[in-house]
Amino acid sequence: MMDSQATTQDADATTAAGGNPVFTAPAGARTAAEVVTPELVARLTRDVVGTGSTANHTPFTGDRLAELPESTPADVATAFARAREAQRAWAAVPLRKRAAVLLRFHDLVLARQSEVLDLIQLETGKARLHAHEEVQAVAVAARHYGRKAPSYLRPRGHTGVVPTLTKVTELRQPRGVIGQIAPWNYPFELSVGDALPAFAAGNAVVMKPDTETALTALWARQLLIEAGLPEQVWQVVIGEGPVIGPAVVQHADYVSFTGSTRTGRGVAQSAAARLVGCSLELGGKNAMLVLRDADLDKAADGAVRGCFSSAGQLCISIERLYVHESVADDFLARFAARTKAMRLGSGLSYGADMGSLVSANQLETVSRHVDEAVAKGATLVAGGRPRPDIGPLFYEPTILDGVDAPMAVCAEETFGPVVSVYRFSDEDRAVDLANDTPYGLNASVWTKDGRRGRAVAARLRTGTVNVNESYAAGYGSVQSPMGGMGDSGLGRRHGSEGILKYTEAQTVAHQRLLPLAPSFGMDDEKYAAFMTLSLRAMKAIRLR
């Protein structure tokens, strides 16, 4: 797709002077007022525990989307009380029946995806294809845990201290009520996608979505209830993070948080003070390595996806691009052509290659990073300016060359459509540069030699590494764990770790026939000698 964009423009795209083409939605495309009706808002917010009032807005225009209930810390306490009561009955439902809810939800998501795609676009400003990534991710997670939860959580037998005499079973008990704080950038996937394994494990959830993307999360809740989840098992509270976020952590039996590293540290400290666990997916400054033998066309296409999906507002997107010096100019020319041809647009339809930033704060950070880098000597290869002609928060996909350490964009997370290009001559040096960051979330390696790519990947200090893909292969492989190292967080989503974290391991040991104590007239000394002999024998026959 991107190859054709590098040479031609669609008939429905127009180009601002020297800038990216603008995608115009087809006639008859839905409007915000047609999607976010008063009836929809009333239906979605009916169960929100909130006594105040707030609102959210669409980044496409800045206009208000909906009036929403606003929760107080007291409302959060009420939500947890309701969830705690409902959780006991939900945990008593057989595991396979709980898992079946997820499979029904999978089918509903795919059947009614147009509804949530409209909401995702309106609340985040992203292009429709990027919104569809969330639909894919949620459907995959629902299918995976719907099928695999019974296996992940089944009772497991273990070898007892005295084989045959000690029978040991490991059980997985739900933690209780999970406190979930979800971000604005992927409001479907990072709300319900993270909650699904918690529900399958028998927990209830009290979720605080970002206010600006609350409708998407509430739509997900309604659909999961249609699939069979009891209403009270999933509670939603809405409000400013500094106001009600601490209350969520204060009442939770386990905390799931996705957001900034700074806020994540505070969440971790608060959870630790209460001796409850937490999982944190935090920031990233992710690197892509283009080795000398890479297919440059494929790598350039991958860089467009990796750097500019969701306008770069993706925790696992690429912000640093290391290219072997022998192919750097050739690669950069291909990458720049594709980037300059990207169509920007705000319509609720497929066709735009990139949408808007989500907030004025994000636009300010992006503009500051780019302007400072250029002022200090970096070269703009593509982009580098806002596009108010499309919408108040649009910014062109931007490539910077000649970036060095004094520039903020070199080390700070930008979280926008900006990537810095660096050249290297030695692979060992490239690995060192990629690892030279406190973050460790995602990385990408491009080479025609798969074995070589996997060897380089194993040396990168990140939770996921994609060879010949930017991020989707690793994230989409839901049987494998996904998460960060270093300042990128704690814990993992997906796979067995993604559901076991929502449980407490319980060991049930049944001692039969003989006690683990002196018996048959043995005194203490004889019993100690007998056990010593037994322990040596068990090692000799290789018992674990």
Image (cartoon, grey):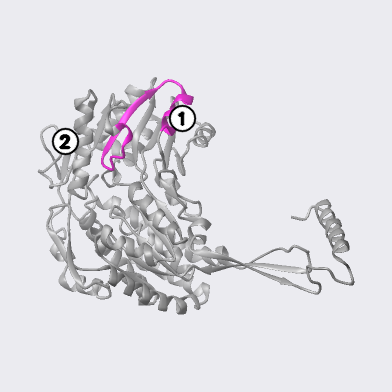
Q: Nearer the viewer, residue 346 or 371?
A: 371
Any part of residue 139 in sight? no
The image quarter containing residue 523 is bottom right
Mark 1: which secondary structure? helix
Judging by the rendered image, the residue that carries numbered circle 1 is 431
Q: Amino acid at mark 1?
A: Val
Rendering coords of residue 316 (x, y %): 37, 44
Location of residue 266 with respect to 509 vertically, above or below: above
Q: Which residues are magenta?
A: 410-436
Does the magenta run of residues contain 415? yes
Question: What residue do we see at 40% from left, 54% from top?
Answer: 269
Query: At which x and y percent is residue 98?
Result: 47, 73
Please tell me how crowded label 2 is: few (under 14), some (14-19), or many (20+) other residues with Cα within 10 Å.
Answer: some
Query: Which residue is drawn at the image coordinates 26% and 63% (left, top)?
Result: 214
Q: Which residue is mark 2?
A: 385
Q: Residue at x 19, y 32 (%)?
A: 371
Residue 301 point in image, percent of width and height: 34, 37
Above or below, 384 against 92 in this view is above
Quadrant of the rendered image containing residue 193:
bottom left
Are there few (<14), some (14-19), or many (20+) residues within 10 Å of tag 1? some
Q: Quadrant of the N terminus?
A: top left
> Is residue 99 rendered to the left or right of residue 21?
right
Q: Look at the image and tell me in which quarter the C terminus lies.
A: bottom right
Alpha carbon of mark 1 to alpha carbon of mark 2: how far?
31 Å
Residue 151 position, x and y percent, is 57, 64
Label disc, if present, on residue 247 of the rendered structure: none
Could you say whether the residue bearing mark 2 is in a helix, strand or loop? loop
Magenta stretch: includes residue 376 = no
Label located before the other in sequence (1 or 2): 2
